[in-house]
Image (tube, rainbow, N blue to C red):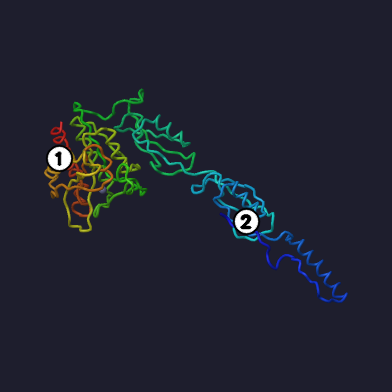
Amino acid sequence: MLKRQVRQADGVCFRPQGRGGSLRTSSQHRFLALGLVLVLLALAVAGCGGGSVTVPNVKRLSVDEAKKVLAENNLQAKVTSELLDDQVPKGHVVNQNPRPGEEVGQETLVQLAVSAGSSGVTVPSVLGKDIEQAKTELAALGLQVRVTKTTSVEPSGTVINQAPGAGSTVTPDSRVDLTVSANFDKTSTRTPAATPSPAKSTGYVVAIDPGHQRRGNAEPEPIGPGSSQTKAKVASGTSGAATRKPEYELTLEISMKLRSYLTGKGVKVVMTRMTHDVDVSNSERAQIANRANADLFVRIHADSSTNPSIEGIRTFYPPNSGWTTPIYAKSSLAATIVQQKVAASSHQKNLGTNIHESQTGFNWSKVPVILVETGFMSNPAEDRFLSNPSSQQAIAKGIGEGVMEYLSRTK
Ligand SMILES: [Zn+2]
């Protein structure tokens, strides 16, 4: 409730005062009469005849409430502008002029700026969707769409990247840039992947996630389905102590070699990214694997330590609890097989397997998932080793052999 704030300003405006009983001469009376005229003239010039008013605060009130409060305070009100505002509901006062607390004459006009509603539209995720469906969803929110086509292993017409990413708040009419998979066959909008498949298809699907991306995204996302706990969507990763190579480059180099190995074995490979300039959060990466109904989701990363002498390769898998309980057994088996094969192939120090708790990219996965930390970029020697194409080939081959053995054992 707003207090009624009308008051007569003491000492400014004329107030009749009783003067009865005082004895004055006629010259004194003439002087008083002249003085009274002068005072009245001054008051007329100052417009102070009705007293002054302290402007009440009507911010955040609805226009009707604001007008009512201002009228009670003997002030005029007029809506003079509308503006987009996230905080103030549509039709409520965002700003006022004169400001609250100012002293003004009665019947002064108070100009009101009123909220036209939220300026923000939350961008949904359209990754993995058909471009026509994505366009429809975004248009329904008043968003513009610009499409860029690129070749990829995803079916033609599939959205493989979007900017801004899901969950971003943008103004209405903003443009969302979509990168859409375009296969060489331009006659059909949804054809099988154009990836050369030299080997007879095995029917297996493996999703590969080259860790990180050029620019991290610090926006929060739930660490698992329905969780109120959040983590940054995706980081840009570590970098090489000797080579200065960013982790996101190394992970894509190794991932592309792993992809070649697996497609050569007749496995369908789904990549979470094929370039560095993407914005795909860790939960979205897991959901790409889910949508592909992958037999295994393989995440490729590189390690970092404050101790530059630490080296070796290791494989993580999710815990036997919470979201990942259903995928624990198979993930654990895949980690064991892959770790043994990759260490044997690359001749790196074998650091074994480990459970990794509370990883967004694990928690959102509904398919068995492992994360291979391919070596320590903080160790100058291992960093140089990791950037060597023949080392990368040995690592990719080792992971690939492990994946194939896992697939055959869980058939
Ligand atoms: Zn990493």
Q: How many marks?
A: 2
Instruction: Give the numbered dot on residue 333.
Output: 1
- Which residue is located at x 45 percent, y 43 percent? 170
The residue most toward the right is 26
- Classed neighbour count for the residue bearing mark 2: other residues with Cα under 10 Å, few (<14), some (14–19), many (≥20): some
Number of the front mark, 1 or 2: 2
**Residue 305 image offset from top left, x and y in percent:** 22, 55
Q: Is residue 80 left or right of residue 245?
A: right
Vertical order, 325 against 105 (above or below): above
Q: Residues within 10 Å of mark 1 (few under 14, many from 20)?
A: some
Q: Compared to 124, does 81 lie above or below?
A: below
Name the residue beneath numbered marker 2.
Answer: 98
Q: Amino acid at mark 1?
A: Leu
Q: Residue at x 45, y 41 (%)?
A: 121
Helix, strand or loop at label 2? It is loop
- Residue 14 position, x and y percent, is 74, 65
Measure the alpha-carbon separation of dots 1 and 2: 71 Å
Q: Residue furthest front?
A: 21
